[in-house]
Image (spheres, rainbow, N blue to C red):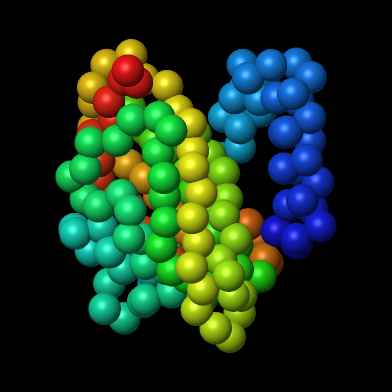
């Protein structure tokens, strides 16, 4: 997805969230199809990229961590325009949160990224934090890193 289009989508979602409320923004995010992992960029069971693909490395959270809202997600990436997309999905593969972070460096160099995502769950359950690059060509998910976590209700 071209950066201008991505910016307009994010701006529209933020406007909806500010003007109409979080429920409408959540509905808008849920209408977006889930990312399709790239066949050449699979994550290992440990949640880190396979040895042949170190495009994105997630340092927090780690596989098996218990996370509660807000959760800090950070790592390093060498991706187009430095932008990584992040999703949190629950045990039913329902998207609880989505956002993006911009690495300190883009294509051609590796940079650090960090962001905080807010989510809601009533019960402790298995979940996944997914970090990936969106294809500039067709919006598909590239270099997907999936981190299995336990989602915990906030305190």
Q: Is residue 86 above or below residue 142?
A: above
Which quadrant: the N terminus?
bottom right
Which residue occupies 57% across, 44% down? 99
Toward the viewer: 73 or 2? Answer: 73
Q: Is residue 135 above or below residue 111?
A: above
Seen as rendered, the residue at the extreme front is 155
Residue 146 in the figure: left or right of residue 125: right
Toward the viewer: 49 or 76? Answer: 76
Q: Is residue 53 visible to the viewer in this orientation of the structure?
A: yes
Quadrant of the image occupied by residue 137 = bottom right
Q: Is residue 46 above or below residue 125?
A: below
Which quadrant: the C terminus?
top left
Quadrant of the image occupied by residue 125 = top left
Seen as rendered, the residue at the extreme bottom is 108
Residue 40 in the figure: left or right of residue 7: left
| x and y, in percent, of residue 134 in the image | 58, 60
Numbered circles on residues, count:
0
Residue 4 in the figure: left or right of residue 127: right
Which residue occupies 40% across, 29% down? 69
Q: Is residue 37 visible to the viewer in this orientation of the structure?
A: no
| x and y, in percent, of residue 116 in the image | 49, 42
């Amino acid at each position: 997805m071209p950066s201008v289009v991505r910016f307009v989508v994010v701006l529209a979602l933020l406007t909806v969230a500010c003007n109409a409320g979080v429920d409408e923004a959540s509905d808008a995010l849920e209408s977006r199809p889930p990312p399709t992992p790239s066949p050449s960029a699979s994550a290992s069971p440990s949640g880190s990229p396979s040895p042949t693909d170190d495009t994105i490395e997630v340092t927090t959270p780690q596989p098996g961590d218990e996370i509660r809202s807000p959760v800090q997600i950070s790592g390093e990436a060498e991706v187009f325009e430095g932008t990584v997309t992040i999703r949190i999905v629950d045990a039913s593969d329902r998207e609880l949160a989505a956002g993006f972070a911009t690495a300190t460096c883009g294509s051609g160099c590796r940079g650090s990224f960090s962001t905080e995502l807010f989510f809601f769950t009533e019960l402790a359950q298995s979940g996944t934090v997914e970090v990936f690059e969106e294809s500039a060509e067709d919006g598909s998910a590239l270099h997907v890193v999936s981190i299995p976590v336990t989602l915990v209700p906030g305190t």
